[in-house]
Image (cartoon, rainbow, N blue to C red):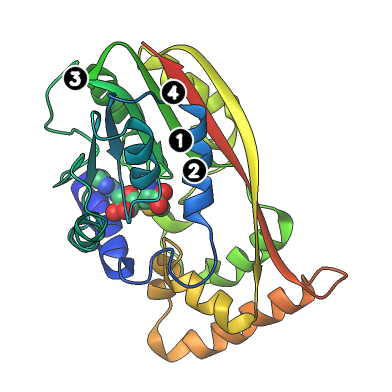
Amino acid sequence: MSTTDQTARVAGIFDRSAQTYDAVGVPWFTPIAAGLVDQLDLRPGERVLDVGCGRGAALFPLAERVGPSGHVTGIDLAPGMIAATAKDVASRGLTNVTLQLMDASDPDLPTSSYDVIASSLVLFFLPDPPAALRTWRALLAPGGRIGVATFMPPEPRWRALDAVFRPYLPPQLLDARTSGSAGPFETDAGVEQLLRDAGIDEVRTVSSQTTVVFTDLEQWHAFSWSHGQRAMWEAVPEGERAKVRAQAEQVLESGRDDDGALRLTQGIRYTLGHV
Ligand SMILES: C[S@@+](CC[C@H](N)C(=O)[O-])C[C@H]1O[C@@H](n2cnc3c(N)ncnc32)[C@H](O)[C@@H]1O
């Protein structure tokens, strides 16, 4: 698959997810992005770029931290994400936020003009993360900081769930969130090296965990369609989705905790540095 096709495929998935993204009653992207924002030591008046802003999980807390004297630019390649988030920006009456439909692989923005770049759960979707990071680095003003959030490898029961979809997935979806066990997103060291290779200094990792409890299997199903996992569903022929859903639900049932709860725990890494 060409890099252009990969970029369009990913943007299409998120475009179709935009209306329900992070809105099915399971707080997921919002706490992950809030953790990233916490690590960035933001100050009022700073100029921030949120790369792959989606529905604003990082964008809104960033705007709050930099205040009316600061500014946040959010870019995303999914028109549905930009349109829905623009409505939210307007309804909150925010004047310190600008949104632009733009490819994160090579943002067309002025160099050396941001104090902070934040990007939550985006870098691993790009066709060439090292090249993208080099372009992001050029956008940072001297002394600027950067933080990216990525997923740590999933816990075993969630790997078992992925396995249900595996027979249907094309190669590029086999391990979309980590680029495989040999890829840079498998380990803290791998992601740190990506940032160092882009010319970012004093790179470090802060790890965190996020846990959600699904009220029921129906809520898991809605959640799984509302974000990147939608790509897995769309890879399953329509006529087979009921069968795959039943298999997935069987896996989920067998993974209930002792208290009967259906929990998803995911390790998150925040990789941070400055120029
Ligand atoms: C998992 S979501 C994260 C969104 C948001 N940062 C959050 O934490 O909720 C990934 C986002 O990256 C965007 N994205 C993927 N590829 C992109 C690209 N090449 N350029 C810009 N945005 C992209 C998607 O449209 C989507 O909004």
Check disc 4 and report the residue beneath it.
194
Of 105 and 136, the residue lying toward us: 136
Going from N to C along the chain, the mark reached first, 2 or 3, is: 2
- Asked if the residue under mark 1 is in contact with the one under mark 3, i.e. CB atoms within 8 Å, the reply is no
Which badge, 4 or 1, comes first in the chain's sequence? Answer: 1
Please tell me which residue is depicted at 18% across the width and 44% down the height of the picture: 95
Mark seen at residue 196: none
Q: Which mark is residue 37?
A: 1
Q: Which of marks 3 and 4 is nearer the N terminus?
A: 3
Residue 267 is left or right of residue 156, and the answer is left
Residue at the (47%, 73%) spot, across then down: 24
Circles 2 and 4, Cβ within 8 Å, touching? The answer is no
- Mark 2: amino acid: Ala
Whether residue 89 is visible here, answered yes or no, is yes
Question: Alpha carbon of mark 2 to alpha carbon of mark 3: how far?
Answer: 23 Å
Location of residue 225 with respect to 64 vertically, above or below: below
Q: How far apart are marks 2 and 4 (CA)?
A: 23 Å
Mark seen at residue 34: 2
The image shows residue 7 at horizontal and vertical percentages of 24, 50
Of badges 2 and 4, nearer the viewer stands 2
Give me the residue at 53% from left, 26% from top: 190
Q: Which amino acid, mark 3?
A: Ser
